[in-house]
Every structure is written in structure tokens, then in C-alpha cells.
Image (cartoon, coloured by chain):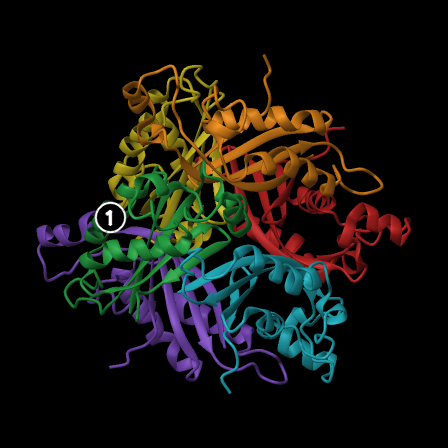
Chain colours: A cyan, B green, C orange, D purple, E yellow, F red
Amino acid sequence: MLITRKIEFSASHACRNPSLSDRENSEIFGTASNPHGHGHNYSVEVTLAGDPDPVTGMVMDLKELKDILNREIVEPFDHRFLNHEVSPFDRVIPTAENVAIEIWRRIEPALAGQLHNVRVWETPDLYVDYSGDAA
Amino acid sequence: MLITRKIEFSASHACRNPSLSDRENSEIFGTASNPHGHGHNYSVEVTLAGDPDPVTGMVMDLKELKDILNREIVEPFDHRFLNHEVSPFDRVIPTAENVAIEIWRRIEPALAGQLHNVRVWETPDLYVDYSGDAA
Amino acid sequence: MLITRKIEFSASHACRNPSLSDRENSEIFGTASNPHGHGHNYSVEVTLAGDPDPVTGMVMDLKELKDILNREIVEPFDHRFLNHEVSPFDRVIPTAENVAIEIWRRIEPALAGQLHNVRVWETPDLYVDYSGDAA
Amino acid sequence: MLITRKIEFSASHACRNPSLSDRENSEIFGTASNPHGHGHNYSVEVTLAGDPDPVTGMVMDLKELKDILNREIVEPFDHRFLNHEVSPFDRVIPTAENVAIEIWRRIEPALAGQLHNVRVWETPDLYVDYSGDAA
Amino acid sequence: MLITRKIEFSASHACRNPSLSDRENSEIFGTASNPHGHGHNYSVEVTLAGDPDPVTGMVMDLKELKDILNREIVEPFDHRFLNHEVSPFDRVIPTAENVAIEIWRRIEPALAGQLHNVRVWETPDLYVDYSGDAA
Amino acid sequence: MLITRKIEFSASHACRNPSLSDRENSEIFGTASNPHGHGHNYSVEVTLAGDPDPVTGMVMDLKELKDILNREIVEPFDHRFLNHEVSPFDRVIPTAENVAIEIWRRIEPALAGQLHNVRVWETPDLYVDYSGDAA
């Protein structure tokens, strides 16, 4: 059984690889490579797997989940320029893909083996899913 | 191939275990344990698996599916206080998890082995997925 | 210029007039008259009118607005059975219309003549607008 | 890792099998069998699987993906009557199921083994998922 | 006070003036002039004005409103090719503007002076509002 | 009669008044005053007033409207840091209120007296409406 909680934060990012030239970045990322950055209302869906507890009927305590997501995602990411203010995006390009991987890395320790998937919506037309590294 | 139909109903519920004290219920469920109940516009996505029929191009007759969902879900759940009026929620806590399991149990017999997943949205920020008990 | 902030709460209500018989309530309100109540994820859009402040560029301090809406609407209404737990709905039928009027009445004193409209969505298909009593 | 891009087109279709009588079509498809057709704002979610490129941080170049989806789906399907103007829907009933299969067939060659799923929303209450034919 | 109810129907239309040439229609309406038609999931918001009834707390009986909207809009428009099957769209171009005017014309007699506005969404990005002819 | 077209752009901004201290900005704007900026998927609804043209059935040529909105709004605002790259936001705080006023100022000359309202959604929970300066 899966349970999914959605949270939102507003941040800015620039899609550019510092080891490439401006022209190369522009060819790869288009206007998203603008070094001043641009922003999104990010929406994140965190999915946990488990069986409902027989006493509570819940896969996980939702208040505790909310606290974890606020502490690990909303507080450090919201109202930030990801490339300049949120590690490791000074050296990892904050594409939607890499944002999802980083969110997984940050919340997985607190979720005791229940974390199943992280979905990151960058715009209403684009989202990525990351469910951990099987490698 | 999968086909998913969404339906909605409005109901109220209280998240509390009758075998626990008021204080214990409040610690576990917070304000959701209020015995007067509170409510949601529930949205349910029912997913069937199958191959399109060569004559109709459809995985299942959508009119028949709609009739089943109305008869088994909308009519018994809509405009009801789940804990008091919909079995087995007098003794099973109607968390989103348990609502999904009960919906699966009710519609599975009519769906001839095609039922693949039941998703229940309790609010726009919280949903659960149940795809049957593998145990 | 208008600025609108949306908030949400989950509550249950019953649409019935205590001075009418069960049969009359059922004829007027249908299944919504069920005395056990049913519920909704209410969404409320509060609209203020004003000119942006030359120093802040804002019609109103959004943090202060959020505090007012939480204190006057979310805290008293969320996770409640309106008819039994929120005044005046023990004697005023909590239709969407009356919920909007009551929200206006509660927040108007704190909004210093800027309150312009209250929109209450009871379901994604039904909403009401109240902009004060001109009478 | 999965990345999903959503696109939209507006088209009309009729759900009818030309080898059946009008009465048989009406029994199977109801008003959707009307030979004049009716229409939808179709929404299509195309999901690719892969690992982020170490240089770009992207599973696929999003500008290239957008070009493929415009060329293969939006341009041929948008503002068309599918049964009369888009092959093979002169002989294949354009149910949501068959539209998804046809979209898969059209874009799969350009997506180099990364195509993972095609979801087609016919209305906000009905969608199908197709992830290729395992047979 | 205003109350708004939303309904939906799926229909196809062609935006073309029969008194113009194909080339002129194409210049004005682009691909929307395709005589085979294309389609939309139309969403219609009907707004009524009034005061809540002191006995029922409602501006209008919602069950009666739903019956009127189904009889006057959904039944005649749903699953139809507007230009060929719904009067007066054989001679009036069924742009969103003209669809809204026609819906107003059809429902106004049953709504006893309470009809305030008709909003027609043709796509999620385009809608029109009509509130009657002041001329 | 009104017709409304929605467009979107992604940008970043910082809410801070350069003539105030960091501490004052933080007290007024909270985390939104972060000088690195943060971002949003802005959604803009542009509403025009007019009567449908008797030949075209349209209040305005939608292709022309789309061209104007792309040229005047999407191209200059999309993927930009408003405070640093879009005039006059180097000296005017780009609150949602001021973004709406600036959009009005930019598109009004091309819309020949038909411009009726500009609505700017900064997040799904906050929007402003500007309909010109009556003063």
C-alpha cells in the first residue's frame, strides 16, 4: 500500500554547467541557462510504502511525516536560489532530475525504509520520478 | 494497458480508535480525532488492466463501469458519516488507507479480475494507492 | 486593485432546518439533510481592495493577512462539524451561502475596510460569492 | 528515473465500429457513437526512463523532446476529426485506448528505447496508460 | 450574493463563416476552420444572483438548478457537432462567445431573473463571460 | 462580453525595497526578501471586453492576441530574474501587484481600448487583479 503527501516550495535555479562555456550552456539549456536564474513553484509528492498499522489504520503518522518534509525540504529549499544557497547545487546542476535525487537523499534516512518514490513537478507540464538507486 | 475512471463523493469521518482513550486518540490523530467528525470531497480513481477488445477498442464498457462505481461507491458513501453509517467503519478506522481497502473489497467481485488499483484522494495534498493484498 | 488569498479547511455539515420535519428537510435538501452530516474540503478565497503601498508594493502585509485568516477561519472551522461546533450554525443552516456570510462577518473587523469579496468553494463544482450586505 | 512531459491537443472523434449497425454502435458506445463526432481537449503525458546525463543533469534534452512531441502528435492530431483525418482511425476506433497505442507507435522510433509510458486523458475523469506491447 | 454551478460537456465545432471562402476562413480562424471540426471538453459556470432564502439558506434549490442545466445544456450539447446538430449553430459560428450567448438564451427563461453570468471555458487557457445584453 | 486568455511564464524575483535595510526588508517581506531571489510559475489571465464581431463571432482575433501576449509578456519575462533583467523592476518592487500593473502598462497600447483586467497568479493560493488606474 502506498501513501503520498504533496508539498510545495518556491525557488529559483539556473540550468547551467559551470565547466561549460556560456555558449555551450545556451545550446544545451536554452534560456534556462540564464545565470541570473529563473523560478518555479515546485510541487513535490513523497510516496511511502507499508501496511496500515492495525491500531491507527495509518501507514505512517501524518503529523510526523509533515514535520520531516517541512524540516528537510520546505525550510531549506523555499525562497532560495538553489545554485547559490542549497548544497550540493553549487556543483550539481539543479535540473528537476537532480532536485528529485537530492530530496530522496535528504529524507530517506528519516523514513525508515518506507520511502518509495519522490515526484518533483517543476511546472504543471513537467515532472520527474525518482525511486532510489538500484545500482 | 490500464484505464482509470475518477469519481467523487462527499463524506465525513472521524479518525479515532474506539478502544483508545480520548487523549490517546488526540495524540495519534490530532484534531482529526474529533468525535463529531469532519469531512472531505473524496476523489477516487479506479484503474483496470486489460487489452482493448478488438470489436469495441475498449478495455471495459465504460457505461457498465460507471454503473458499478455508482452502485458500490457513490450511493453508499456519498453524504454519509462513514463511522456511523457505512460498514465496516463502525469498527475499522476510516483513514484514507482503510477507505481504499474497503472500496477495493466492494468493487473487486464485479470487475472480473481486471481491477488493478484504487487511489483515494482525501484532500488535494494526500492520497493512497491500494492494489490488493498479495499476502 | 484586488488581491486574493486562498485557504482551505475540511469540515462536515448537515443542510437541515431544525424547525422543519425530516420529510420536509429531505424534500428541500435531499441526502444533504442527513443529520449525521457529510463533509467537504472547503476552499475560501478572500479578496481585498486597495492600492499598493508605495514603500512595500503590497496592498496588504501578506503575513498579517495569513495570520488573520488562520485565526478567524482555519482554526475555528477546520476538522469541525459546523452545525454542532461552530456558532451560529447551531441555528443558521451551514449552506455555502451562510458559511460565506459568516466568514465575512468574522474577518471584516480585522481588515479595516479593505475586505471586498469572500468566495467559498464547497466542491470543485459549486461556489458562492459574498461581498457584504448593501441593505 | 522517469521524466514526464505533458502536451495538449483538441480533436473530435466518434466511437463507432463501421462493421456494426447504428443500433449496435449505440448500444455499445451510447451517444459517443454519434457519426458527426464530438470532441475533447486531450492531454497526453509522455514518460521517458533513463539516468540523468552527468554533463547536463537531464534524462533527455527537453527541447528535442518538445520538438518530437509537436511534430509527431500535436501537428497531426490538433484540430482534427480523428476518424476522418488521422490514420489509422479510419479503420481503428479512436477510443482513448487506441489513441494511446497510436501515439506510442508514432513517437517510439524517435525516442531511442527510452519511451516508458503514454498516458492519454480524454476528459478530466478518464485516462488510459499504455507502456508498449509485451506480447 | 452569487452562487455558481459548474457543468461540463464534450462537443465538436468548426469555426468558419459559411459566407466566406475556405481561404478567408483559414486566414481568420487558422486550423480551427477545418470543416471536419475538432472538439473540446467545454466547462460552463452558471452564476445566479439573489439572497439566501430564510427557510433554506439557499439562493436557489440546487437540485432544480441541476435539472435545468442538464435539460437545457448538457442534453442538447453533449456529444454533438455543434455546427450540424445544435441550433442556431448551422448559421451562427459556434465560437466560445456565441456558445455563451446561446446558453444564456436557453436557460434565462427558467431562471426567473436570477441569471447573472455565463462563463464558458473552451480550453483550460480560454474562457468567455456573458452577462446578458444591456442594449 | 469578456474574453480571457491565460499564459504562463517562469521567473524569479526578490521582494525588497533597496532603500530599506536588510533587517527592515526581512521584517516586511520575510524570506521573500532574500536578495538571491526565488521563483514562481506565474500564470497571467488577460481579459478583454467587447462585442463579438458579426462576421467572425469573436471579440478579438485570438491569434493576434496570442502574438501580443507572447511579444509583450512571455518573451521579456520568461526565464528572467525580474529585479535585475526586466525594467522597471530594478527600482519598482516586483510584488504580484506591481507585476500586474506593469503587464497592463505593456499590453494596453496594443489592445485598442479593449483591455479590461489583468490577473496575475504568483502561486496557486495568491493572485491579484488590476483593471487600470481610474485616478
Nearer to us in this view, F15 or D111: F15
Nearer to us in this view, D19 or E69: E69
Vertical placement of C19 versus D127: above or below?
Answer: above
Question: Which residue: 29% across, 34% down?
Answer: E70
Q: Position of residue E66 (x, y in %)?
A: 33, 31
Q: Position of residue E27 (x, y in %)?
A: 45, 52
Q: Position of residue E14 (x, y in %)?
A: 35, 48
Question: Which residue: 73% across, 46% down?
Answer: F102
Vertical placement of A134 versus C28: above or below?
Answer: below
Q: Quadrant of the N terminus of chain C?
A: top right
Nearer to us in this view, C100 or B89: B89
Q: Position of residue D32 (x, y in %)?
A: 22, 51
Question: Which residue: 35% across, 27% down?
Answer: C33
Residue found farthest to the top:
C135
Residue A39 in sight in this render:
no
**Amino acid type of the residue that numbered disc 1 sits on in the rendered structure:** Glu
Say whether residue D83 is left or right of residue D60: left
Nearer to us in this view, C86 or E91: C86
Q: Quadrant of the C terminus of chain C?
A: top right
Which residue, given by chain and number where applicable, does mark 1 sit on?
B72
